[in-house]
Image (cartoon, rainbow, N blue to C red):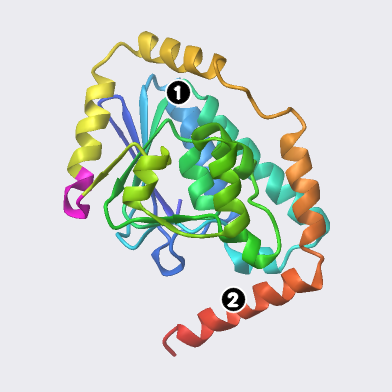
Amino acid sequence: MKRIQSSLEGGVGRILLDKPARMNALDPEMLAGIERLVNDWENAGASVVVLGSSSARAFCVGADLEVLAGMNETTMREWELLGSRVLDRLQRSPLVSIAAIPGHALGGGLTLAAACDFRVAADTAGFAQPEIGLGWIPGWCGVARLARLIGPGRAKDLCMTGRRVNAAEAVVMGLINEAVPGELLPARVEEFAAGLAASSPAALRAIKGLAASCEVPPAATAPSFDALVNSSLLKDPRAQAAIARFLARKAAKEPR
């Protein structure tokens, strides 16, 4: 589909988010495309999936605010549930997932990366959950996914302050596994993926399942709770005004 490139070779599926003009801001079709590819590659016997970007500027900046701006309470709830379902599908898939992060990973983009098994980033990449500045919470179980990855205290820090962290700090806090010079990122990710794909698929699945069994999973109601909260918060005039300001600033920066 447009906005997503994909390929499958040597047991490794590759997804490239390809919406560079909007820094890979996600829309429903892109989420559905990720879910479909994960399903197809499981059935094809792949063992690894790499999720990356066609642009060095950004991995993904989360939800497309132009899409959100047109949502009502019902469609916002549906959007939240769709995102949670797709990210759960990726996180729980027997495929070993690697997020290759060349640049910004913000909001839902960071949540998408957190749903992967591994995150390898350029040393110039930046990370943040800026939703608090727009008047809502990280969606798609973003708070829970971060807490699982870096602990509740650090998750609250990122989600309540909206502050950005660089790649060096992200490594220290466990947000990413590795940071490399940007020009080396594609080769490093390919090396990593090939090494995993050369291992026993059954053993990889067993290790992933055993590691997951040691985690405290989010409550079964977490996706519905996030959807309810954000669909309600979106109605707040302050949230609507924040979205409008953001889109106005973006429009002012675009070439005419």
Q: Which residues are magenta?
A: 181-186
Is 178 in front, or is 183?
178
3D distance between C-alphas at marks 1 and 2: 39 Å
Residue 191 coordinates in the image, percent (x, y): 19, 32
Write the residue at 41% across / 87% down. Answer: 255
Q: Based on the picture, tell me whether residue 174 belongs to the magenta stretch.
A: no
For numbered disc 2, what is the local secondary structure? helix
Q: Against 29, is 14 above or below?
A: above
Residue 15 visible? The answer is no
Q: Which label is found at residue 42?
A: 1
At a point 74% along the width and 55% down the height, the residue shown is 76
Q: Which mark is residue 91?
A: none
Q: In this view, which residue lies farthest toward the front?
A: 153
Residue, x 72% and y 77% (percent of image)? 241
Amino acid found under the numbered disc labelled 2: Phe
- For mark 1, give the secondary structure: helix
Q: N-terminal of the two: label 1 or label 2?
A: 1
Confirm whether the magenta stretch covers residue 183. yes
Estimate the x, y position of residue 238 in percent, counting from the top left. Answer: 76, 73
Q: Is there any visible trace of residue 164 in the rendered image?
A: yes
Q: Amino acid at mark 1?
A: Glu
Numbered disc in front, either 1 or 2: 2
Identify residue for label 2.
Answer: 246
Residue at 62 percent of width and 59 percent of height: 131
The percent coordinates of residue 109 (x first, y second) are: 49, 51
Residue 13 versus residue 161 in the image, above or below: above
Residue 130 falls in image quadrant: bottom right
Q: Quadrant of residue 104?
A: bottom left
